Image (cartoon, coloured by chain):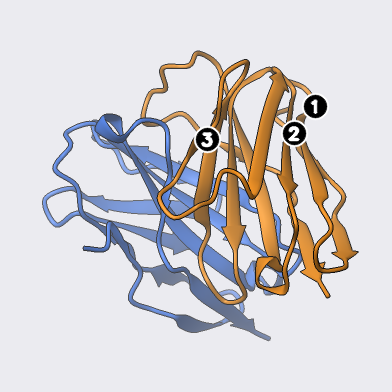
Chain colours: A orange, B blue
Amino acid sequence: GAVVSQHPSWVICKSGTSVKIECRSLDFQATTMFWYRQFPKQSLMLMATSNEGSKATYEQGVEKDKFLINHASLTLSTLTVTSAHPEDSSFYICSARMGLASAHPTDTQYFGPGTRLTVL
Amino acid sequence: AQKITQTQPGMFVQEKEAVTLDCTYDTSDQSYGLFWYKQPSSGEMIFLIYQGSYDEQNATEGRYSLNFQKARKSANLVISASQLGDSAMYFCAMRERNYGQNFVFGPGTRLSVLP
C-alpha cells in the first residue's frame, strides 16, 4: 500500500517550452502533496505544498508563476514548469500524505519515483 | 542554522558489518518526528524508519534501528549486517508540529558497502 507514481520518469525539452509532471497516489487519498527539487549531489528542497482544492503554498524563493501546481483531486497533483530554462534541469520528486489535513508530526510521507527534467 | 546535520558526506562499510549514520537536529518544538530515507541511484526515496519525540523506545525495523538520544538531539541510524544493496544515499529528516506538515531534510550521507 501507499504507492505514489510520477509521470513521466524523465523528460527532455527545449528551452522556452512548458513541461507538466503528474503525481498520483495510487491506493490512498492524499489530502496533501509536496513537490521537491533535488540538484545533483544535493538534498531535497521543498518547493511547495498543495492541499486538494486550494492554492499551493510556495517556499521562499520559488516562483509560483513559473512552477504552477494544481491539486485538482485527492489522488492527483500536477507541477507545470513554464518557459523552462537550462537552470530548471533537475530531479523533481513529489510526495503524498494520507489522512487529515492536520498532520501529526510522525505522519509519514510517501514519495514518488521522481522525474528527471533536462532542458536543452 | 541547519535544522538537520549529517556530518558524514560518505561512509564505507564492509559487507555483513554494522554501520552507524549520524544525524543531529535542532528544534525548540516538543512534538516532532524524525525519519530516515534511503535513496538509491534510481532516485526513489524509500522510507526506512521513524521516531516520534515522545517515543521512549528506540525504533527498529528489521535491520534498521534508530539510536535516539533526545537530550543530545541525535537520531543515528544503525544498519546491521550490511548488504551490497544498502549502498545508497541516506537522508535524515524532521517534521515539527509548529512548522506544519513539511519535512526538512539533512544533506545526506552516501554509504558504500564493500564486498
Residue ID for mark 2: A3
The answer to whether one can see residue B54 in this image is: yes
- Please, what secondary structure does the residue beneath circle 3 have? strand
The answer to which of marks 1 and 3 sits earlier in the sequence is: 1
- Check the image and report above or below for B56 versus B11: above
- Please, what secondary structure does the residue beneath circle 1 have? loop
- Check the image and report above or below for B24 versus A108: below
Residue ID for mark 3: A49
Side of B55 where B93 appears, left or right: right
Residue type pointed to by label 2: Val
| Residue A50, x across and y down, in percent | 57, 30
The answer to which of marks 1 and 2 sits earlier in the sequence is: 2
Q: Who is closer to the viewer here, A39 or A30? A: A39
Q: Locate residue B101: give its quadrant.
A: top left
Residue type pointed to by label 1: Leu
Q: Residues within 10 Å of mark 1 (few under 14, many from 20)?
A: some
